[in-house]
């Protein structure tokens, strides 16, 4: 999504429409998830990013608001098998999420296996495109060099990431 003006010139509401509110802490209780999703909706965030187990809590809280649900697949490491990632993606798509974020396998990125990264991402991205659901790729940039980040971005684009 491209901005229409610089962030410094936006109102809080305009800026919030570009923000994904993260609700991903592994120790969040259901009450914590409710609180944070409600906060994201209250801010008018573009989405609330949740783990798959939080869909049943977040979806009703976002329903009827401009805030969508974004589910992260294979967070935080991106180290599951491609088959597992595809299955998880299909499950969250069947739940009716508004967006999917997939974590790139940064061990493969660091190992220079960019063809494998691209193929893996494409396998997850295709069902999202078939369902007309936007999909973004997450890189653990703190574990990657600039060259690795650039290569991962190129593999993601080649795989069809939005």
Image: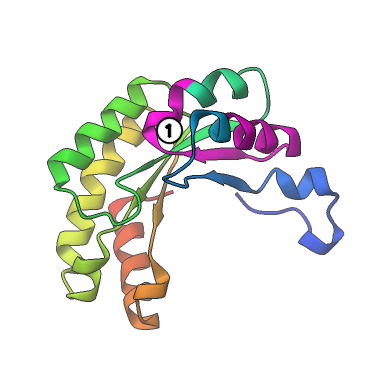
Residue 62 falls within the magenta-colored stretch: no
Expressed as whole percent of the image width and height from the top left, the position of residue 132 reads 41, 30
Residue 41 falls within the magenta-colored stretch: yes
Answer with left or right where residue 83 lies relative to residue 68: left
Which residue lies at the image location 38% right of the left edge and 50% below the top edge? 161
Query: Which SS does the magenta portion mostly show?
Result: helix
Q: Residue 89 appears in which quarter of the rendering?
A: top left
Of residues 6 and 141, which is closer to you in this image?
Answer: 141
Residue 88 at least partly seen: yes
Expressed as whole percent of the image width and height from the top left, the position of residue 57 reads 50, 23
Which residue lies at the image location 31% right of the left edge and 73% below the top edge? 151
Expressed as whole percent of the image width and height from the top left, the position of residue 123 reads 21, 44
Answer with left or right where residue 60 lies relative to residue 162: right
Which residue lies at the image location 21% right of the left edge and 37% below the top edge? 86
Which residue lies at the image location 30% right of the left edge and 43% below the top edge? 125
Q: How is the image coloured?
A: rainbow
Residue 132 at least partly seen: no
Magenta range is: 34-56
Vertically, is 99 above or below 82?
Answer: above
Vertically, is 33 above or below 111?
Answer: above
Expressed as whole percent of the image width and height from the top left, the position of residue 130 reads 32, 30
The total of numbered circles placed on residues is 1
Residue where numbered disc 1 is placed: 133
| Label 1 neighbour load within 10 Å: few <14, some 14-19, many 20+ | some
* Secondary element at image label 1: loop
């Amino acid at each position: 999504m491209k901005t229409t003006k610089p962030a410094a010139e936006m109102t809080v509401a305009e800026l919030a429409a570009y923000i994904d509110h993260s609700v991903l802490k592994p120790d969040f209780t259901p009450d914590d998830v409710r609180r944070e999703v409600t906060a994201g909706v209250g801010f008018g965030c573009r989405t609330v990013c949740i783990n798959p187990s939080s869909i049943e809590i977040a979806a009703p809280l976002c329903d009827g608001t401009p805030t969508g649900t974004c589910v992260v697949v294979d967070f935080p490491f991106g180290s599951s098998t491609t088959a597992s990632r595809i299955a998880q993606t299909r499950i969250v798509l069947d739940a009716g999420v508004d967006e999917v974020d997939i974590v790139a396998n940064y061990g493969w990125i660091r190992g220079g296996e960019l063809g494998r990264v691209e193929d893996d991402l494409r396998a997850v991205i295709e069902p999202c495109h078939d369902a007309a659901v936007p999909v973004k790729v997450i890189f653990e940039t703190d574990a990657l060099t600039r060259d690795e980040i650039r290569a991962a971005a190129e593999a993601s684009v080649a795989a069809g990431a939005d």
